[in-house]
Image: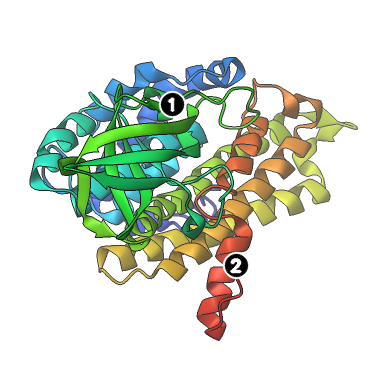
């Protein structure tokens, strides 16, 4: 590539280091986002509507459970999955969240911890988009402390009886099955609770100002009885759900890059076309300094996630490394979205532009699956050997 033709969204030409398959995956998802997502997502956000009509198209592209092997899944590598998340979040965090939950928080634990019967029952239909799942870990009082779990499951003959509540659950109200984590006499265990089970309800949480194009719900369990074969046999203790979160957080690190790229691309175009005080906005030093800083921070985030993906593909990824990237990349994306919103001036608060939508979405992304402070403390513990939680 000529020195005068750098891609503003890929200053270090990381694209050139991708394999042919990885580049094809990125291009395919990018086209889908450009043609199917971006034309409708602003209206969906404004209306508070999840674009469920996109689910069959997402499934047809093989994006659900894409990194899993067998059972109708694509079996892609970790970098390809990251690129999927990046391009989807370039469209909207809500759509990436849907795919992340389906893939990393529902299909992954069934694949990793489930019985063969559970895998055969759920994975093919979930890969095809014919069944939707949700992940029930966070509780109303618990937030960042899953060890303080109040949802309980007790044995009753050959069944388990679950009581408790979960909060802020993506896909909850539209899910056909919930992966639910509950405290038992044996420690934390996972259960598959199907929609329509007596005593189980999943009301949608309304009046959100973030992730408005995503379904967020509460889950309530009132003497919910599930047979023993709906327990995940391979998951015991908090290691099970935390392992799922590591998978999802990995994809989130890439998603933040996509949101930031969308905002920077918009700011570049706007600052070139907007004329103030007799010259284009991008002719001002202050504006160029801000744009340059955004490109620098995106480049650093890209390199973090790409190396993280390569470590994951080698089986060498450490959860603390995921924390570094989630902390860095989502803070980067939120700061850039806010700055781009400011550069757009009054236009920046309109749904016709993406910066305000990405900014509001990222306020959730920086909170869920480990707040910024939690990830800082994870890194601090790794550095010092001392837990300060």
How far is the residue under mark 2 from the one under mark 1?
Answer: 32 Å
- Is 169 displayed left or right of 356 in the figure? left
* 349, above or below 90, in the image: above
Residue ID for mark 2? 376
Residue 24 shows in this picture:
no
Q: Quadrant of residue 175?
A: top left
**Secondary element type, mark 2:** helix
Q: Quadrant of the C terminus?
A: bottom right
Most foreground residue, 173 or 35: 173
Q: How was this image coloured?
A: rainbow
* 79, above or below 34, in the image: below
- Is 339 displayed left or right of 135 in the figure? right
Q: What's the residue at 51%, 22% (across, down)?
A: 41
Residue ID for mark 1? 202
Upstream in the sequence, badge 2 or badge 1?
Answer: 1
Q: Quadrant of the N terminus?
A: bottom left
Q: What's the residue at 58%, 62% (across, down)?
A: 374
* Furthest-front residue in this view: 157
* 25, above or below 127, in the image: below
Mark 2: few, some, or many residues within 10 Å (few <14, many ≥20)?
Answer: some
Most foreground residue, 366 or 343: 366
């Amino acid at each position: 590539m000529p020195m005068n033709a750098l891609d503003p969204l890929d200053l270090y030409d990381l694209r050139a280091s991708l394999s042919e398959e990885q580049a094809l995956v990125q291009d395919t998802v990018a086209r889908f986002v450009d043609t199917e997502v971006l034309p409708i997502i602003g209206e969906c956000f404004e209306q508070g509507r999840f674009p469920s009509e996109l689910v069959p198209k997402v499934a047809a592209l093989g994006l659900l459970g894409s990194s899993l092997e067998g059972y109708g899944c694509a079996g892609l590598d970790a970098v390809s999955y990251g690129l999927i998340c990046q391009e989807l979040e370039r469209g909207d965090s809500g759509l990436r969240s849907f795919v992340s939950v389906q893939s990393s928080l529902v299909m992954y634990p069934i694949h990793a911890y489930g019985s063969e019967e559970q895998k055969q029952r759920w994975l093919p239909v979930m890969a095809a988009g014919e069944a939707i799942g949700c992940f029930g870990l966070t509780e109303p009082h618990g937030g960042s402390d899953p060890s303080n779990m109040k949802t309980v499951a007790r044995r009753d003959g050959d069944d388990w009886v679950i009581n408790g509540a979960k909060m802020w659950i993506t896909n909850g109200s539209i899910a056909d099955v919930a992966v639910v984590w509950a405290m038992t006499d044996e420690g934390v265990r996972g259960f598959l609770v199907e929609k329509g089970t007596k005593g189980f309800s999943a009301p949608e949480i309304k009046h959100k100002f973030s992730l408005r194009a995503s379904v967020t719900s509460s889950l309530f369990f009132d003497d919910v009885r599930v047979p023993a074969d709906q327990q995940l046999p391979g998951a015991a203790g908090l290691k099970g759900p935390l392992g799922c979160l590591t998978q999802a957080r990995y994809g989130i690190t890439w998603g933040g890059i996509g949101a930031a790229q969308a905002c920077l691309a918009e700011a570049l175009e706007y600052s070139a076309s907007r004329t103030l005080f007799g010259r284009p906005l991008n002719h001002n030093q202050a504006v160029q300094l801000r744009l340059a800083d955004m490109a620098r921070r995106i480049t650093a985030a890209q390199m973090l996630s790409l190396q993280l993906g390569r470590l994951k593909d080698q089986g060498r990824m450490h959860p603390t490394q995921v924390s570094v990237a989630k902390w860095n990349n989502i803070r980067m994306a939120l700061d850039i979205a806010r700055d781009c919103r400011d550069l757009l001036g009054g236009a920046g608060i309109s749904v016709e532009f993406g910066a305000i939508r990405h900014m509001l979405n990222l306020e959730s992304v920086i909170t869920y699956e480990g707040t910024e402070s939690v990830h800082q403390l994870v890194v601090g513990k790794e550095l010092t050997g001392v837990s300060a939680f």
